[in-house]
Amino acid sequence: MHIMEGFLPPLHAAAWGAASVPFLIMGSRRIKRILKEHPETRLLLGASAAFSFVLSALKLPSVTGSSSHPTGTGLGALLFGPSVMAVLGAIVLLFQALLLAHGGLSTLGANLFAMGVAGPYVAYGVHRLMTRLGSKGSIAIFSATALGCLATYVVTAIQLGLAFPDPVGGSAGSILTFLSIFALTQIPLAITEGVLTVMVMNFLLEYSRDELNDLKRFSKRSKREVTA
């Protein structure tokens, strides 16, 4: 991840693109609502996109047709909710494909599903689970963002394995091969991303506490409305 232009078979690329569309719709609606009720969070929203753009622009060759790097999507997922990162991730990936030749347009849907959907939802879910179990603060943030980063590459390995099954082991064997290769580079990068995200969150807690409190109240109210 990012999977390069033209690397996936057209049917696979189209299927992953279609799978990403519902998350883009949900994310667009949530962003619209957040900005309507809390326009002061625009800077935080932009900072979340910038954080993801910078970290995911690092390009370390991993396997043929793909590359390895931090994703930076966990920060926005914890601040605004995972659906928001589908939209921010799409913007980041589109600019990287057009300006940096990092990823591609035909593989945009697959890259988005891995980085803008799977990673953020895992990060958000892990953080919620850990806070419910009593683990709060830096440990929960670190664990959530590191595992979210790893989840991105698990999904990418699945995408590549399904597209290019092993002649002997089939898709399962190919997925295991891709996972083993990604793990060598991604585990230390996931740890690094977790540490960086904790540092950024601590900075925001010191200098943007009012905006974070507004977002926390907004998220709690949204959950009540959904379950009502």
Image (cartoon, grey):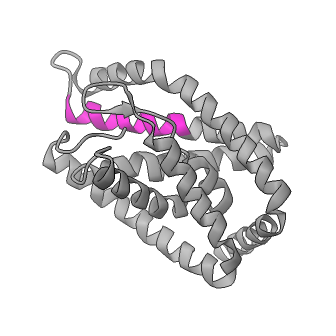
210 relative to 139, above or below: below
Q: Which of the 4 image quadrants contains residue 144?
A: top right
Image: magenta residue range: 149-164
Image location (x, y in percent) of residue 161? 28, 30
Count up the numbered dots.
Answer: 0
Q: Residue farthest to the front?
A: 99
Apparent side of residue 199 relative to residue 93 in the rendered image (left or right): right
Residue shown at 85% from the left, 55% from the top: 206
111 relative to 184, above or below: below
User: In which quadrant of the rendered image does the C terminus lie?
Assistant: bottom right
Instruction: Report if residue 120 is visible in the image.
Output: no
**Magenta highlight on residue 156:** yes
Image location (x, y in percent) of residue 219? 71, 68
Main SS, magenta residues: helix
Residue shown at 51% from the left, 46% from the top: 54
Q: Residue farthest to the bottom?
A: 36
Residue shown at 30% from the left, 51% from the top: 97
User: In which quadrant of the rendered image does the N terminus lie?
Assistant: top left
Depth order, front residue of 95/176: 95
Image location (x, y in percent) of residue 23? 44, 63
**Magenta highlight on residue 31:** no
Image location (x, y in percent) of residue 130? 75, 42
Residue shown at 61% from the left, 79% from the top: 35
Q: Which of the 4 image quadrants contains residue 36?
A: bottom right
Apparent side of residue 182 relative to residue 210 in the rendered image (left or right): left
Instruction: Report if residue 171 is visible in the image.
Output: yes
Q: Residue farthest to the top?
A: 168
